[in-house]
Image (spheres, rainbow, N blue to C red):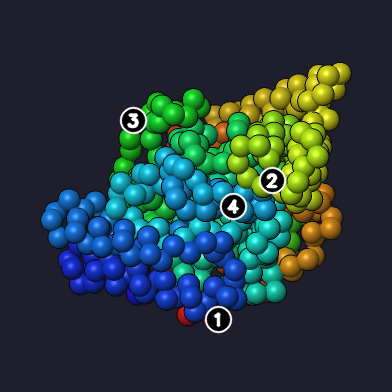
Amino acid sequence: MHNKTLIELSRALHQRECSSVELTRYFLERIKTHDTQLNSFITQTPELALAQAQAADERLNNGTAQPLTGIPIAHKDIFCTQGVKTSCGSKMLDNFIAPYNATVVEKCQAAGMVMLGKTNMDEFAMGSSNETSFYGPVKNPWDTQTVPGGSSGGGAAAVAARLTPIATGTDTGGSIRQPASLCGITGFKPTYGRVSRYGMIAFASSLDQGGPLGRSAEDVALLLNVITGFDERDSTSLEHPQEDYTAHLNDSIEGLKIGLPKEYFSEGIDAGVGNALETAIKEFEQAGATLHDIHLPHSHLAIPVYYIIAPAECSSNLSRYDGVRFGHRCEQPQDLMDLYKRSRGEGFGPEVKRRIMIGTYALSAGYYDAYYLKAQQIRRLISKDFTQAFEQVDVILGPTSPTTAFKIGEKIDDPVTMYLSDINTISVNLAGLPALSIPAGFAEQRPVGLQLIGNYLKEAQLLNIAHQYQQRTDWHQQQPPQFQ
Ligand code: GLN
């Protein structure tokens, strides 16, 4: 049951071979059995799930069901879920019960999907290893001594271990793609503005974007069909017609021009990752694609630019957690200043504090021009690199992450090394482009991810390319031995 694709599950439900209640019970049971080892969920919602499953069964019986009606899903704990704790991985929101649903959650509900619970994540989505979560680290199902990546590590681990058929994540600098890569699954970050940010707790608003974590391009396409679309409650939402992302999965990729940026294959990339990529590239050639060397000359500036812009936006977004309206409040404050200081001091973890301090500094009078403005100017150059590349090629290919999963604890005390985990993913957010990570082999039994970056709104094309690769390979079907 847990190895079925979304299409297979949908068919089984629609043909009434199994009910949504049965399917939901099955996955709840798997979570119960396995999640003590993984810690991929912060909150499980079995009662709500069974109620939603029952409603889904009614729809399946009365002919009002949609393709994903009755299928279980796990939401990253950054999406507000009405009446359910929404912690964002932080002590600050440990007591926060969201009063409304995020648009993404609402859309999944309207489609009849069943929420199993809320997945673990780095605190306020700041991290690349899931170790900054107030709820403890998530373990990678391929090797529980290693990290699952972050910040959507809970969702990625849960999908990889087959504790849920599909999950949502968010990606500000790589947080869908990098954990997908490290856990051997498929993760998609859409074009900025394609998925509503309403009710998705803000980290860096000009970079944040929600998207699916699934086992295959096809599964991801099916969830994208549900969660994309214009939302007037998000001022940065794109007005773009609804698309069926499954419509072009089977198109031929004969003649596709793939760009290989020199900068993504240079030093810093693990030999095992490089070898897996080489094999994958040959596969694309055999499918009829042509390869082209390209340059993204400002790539090396992506991390420094991101670590000005993201902290600057986070320092502003996180100023709302003041102990007054919601979230953690310190005991017996002496006065208002004491209330602010101690509530924030106690509620936030070290990585979040580090970012708030950097961001506050970068935005302060006298420094704004030197840091924030400069960073925005370089951000523009990074976007231009991509625009120029897409004049020559259809899609850009490279490793999602320069390494495979690393040991828990290995990088947590060295923020700069940790930040380098996202060296190939961050520039995509700075430019607002769509990109996905697909499994492309193993290096020392750890999954390797391949990233495909597309031009604006080329979601369908990316999914087509990924699906064609997955038709020719079976990396996406591999399952962690401990979680069969
Ligand atoms: N790892 C990056 C960071 O720590 C990206 C996180 C994300 O995409 N949310 O900011």
Circles 1 and 3: CB atoms closer than 8 Å: no
Please determine whether, in this image, residue 127 is positioned above or below residue 18. above
Q: What residue type is labelled 1?
A: Gln
Q: What residue type is labelled 2?
A: Arg
Asked whether, in this view, residue 116 is left or right of residue 43, the answer is left
Which residue appears at 20% of the width and 72% of the height? 17
Rendered-image quadrant of the N terminus: bottom left
Q: Which dot marks residue 95?
A: 4
Asked whether, in this view, residue 37 is left or right of residue 408, the answer is left
- The image position of residue 164, as x and y in percent, is 44, 65
Q: What residue type is labelled 3?
A: Pro
The residue that disc 1 covers is: 482
Q: Which dot marks residue 241?
A: 3
Q: Who is closer to the viewer here, 93 or 400?
A: 93
Q: Which badge, 1 or 4, is on the more N-terminal residue?
A: 4
Report whether residue 123 is seen.
Answer: yes
Can you tell me whether the CB of the residue at mark 3 lies under 8 Å from the nearest atom of ligand 1?
Answer: no
The residue that disc 2 covers is: 329
